[in-house]
Amino acid sequence: MKAYWIKHDGQNAALELRELPVPEPGPGQLVMRVRAASLNRGDLLGAIAHHRSVEGRPAGVDGAGEVHALGEGVRDFKPGERIMARSRGCFAEYVLVDPKLASRVPDRLTWEEAGAIPISYVTAWEALIQFGRLQAGETVLIAGASSGVGVCSIQLAKVRGAKVIGVSTSEQKLGKLRALGMDIGIHARAGDDFSAQVLQANGGKGVDVAVNLVGGTVFAACQRSLADFGRLVIVGYVDGVMKAEIDLEAIHTKRLEVVGISNAPLTPAMRAEATVGLNRDVLPAIADGRIQPVIDRVFPFDELSAAKAYVETGAHIGKVVIRMP
């Protein structure tokens, strides 16, 4: 089978197409015939040390396809079923999958739509529900709102009954995000302190949850935007800035919480818990159409390098997806 591997040299990543045998499932595993897979910055970029691989590793971390083969003891799925899953090595024709990280694909979805779901919506679920504890009537700030996880967070927050304030460096993107349900859009140049704009837009009140998808350049502004008992969730570092100012007095006096979202330290049980949350809190809204996966562009499998270059420009809104041969 054809499969891409990825190697990191500092923050630069190179893709390599290899010819590998089709994997055989071991006990408690299944093999998925991949039909579509999405691009995720954490997999493609080496800015975060936990994601780097100098020696090389299978590329792609989520996708959708049919169950090809089942290992001993796997009873939750049947051969031929349409599934979507998180698994290392999804930029390949076949991939090994932990069944606890797989979900059935709603009938209404195309392969490309299903392939765009697992990582981004799981991450949005972790940020807003598991750690953000977002409730109906609360307000959430999303910095980097046009990213894949940003768009998913807008959609999930609206389904939860929350008010959404999004921040982007592009006025054009903000217009498109409003059409997806975002209540208030704030245009801010890279490095701007947008906290005063957030407070003004929210009637002088801070937000209950802030999701930082950008990195160190917006950390201070996100923290300043929080209300008492606010929760700040750090998800990404597209700006490559790993250090930021922390106002300890504000964290103390306002009883703020700061939490990071990363797959790197999670145990298999923790990853499985996130799949349970996705199935319970997100997939019903996708199945009935309240949430529609947003795909910016679809590239064929043999143009993965071009897809990677496009994602690195930051021009996309939502997800970029690879269609498998």
Image (tube, rainbow, N blue to C red):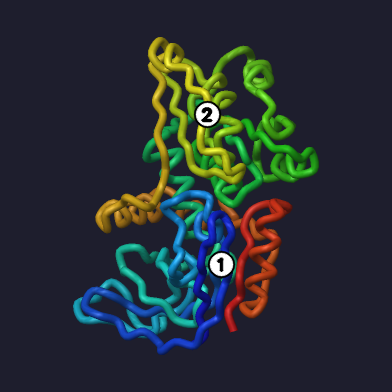
Q: Which residue is mark 1?
A: 109
Residue 229, picture quadrant: top left
Q: Residues within 10 Å of mark 1 (few under 14, many from 20)?
A: some
**Closer to the camera in the image, 46 or 132:** 46
Name which residue lies at 67% across and 69% down. 298
Name the image quarter holding residue 237: top right
x%, y% of residue 261? 42, 43
Residue at the image position 25 percent from the left and 80 percent from the top: 26
Query: Callout 2, which amino acid?
Result: Ala
x then y, percent, for residue 254: 42, 13
Q: Quadrant of the C terminus?
A: bottom right
Q: Give the label, 2 or 1, closer to the camera.
A: 2
Mark 2: secondary structure: loop
Q: Nearer the viewer, residue 137 or 51?
A: 51
Q: Secondary structure at mark 1?
A: loop
Q: Dot 2 surroundings within 10 Å: few (below 14), some, or many (20 or more)?
A: few
Separation of disc 2 and disc 1 at Cα?
40 Å
Is residue 40 among the parts visible in the rendering?
Answer: no
Instruction: Name which residue lies at 49% across and 69% down.
Output: 59
The answer to whether residue 5 of the structure is visible from this angle is: yes
Name the residue tied to disc 2: 244
The location of residue 319, given as percent across then percent down, is 62, 58
Question: Is the residue 28 above or below the residue 206 in the image?
Answer: below
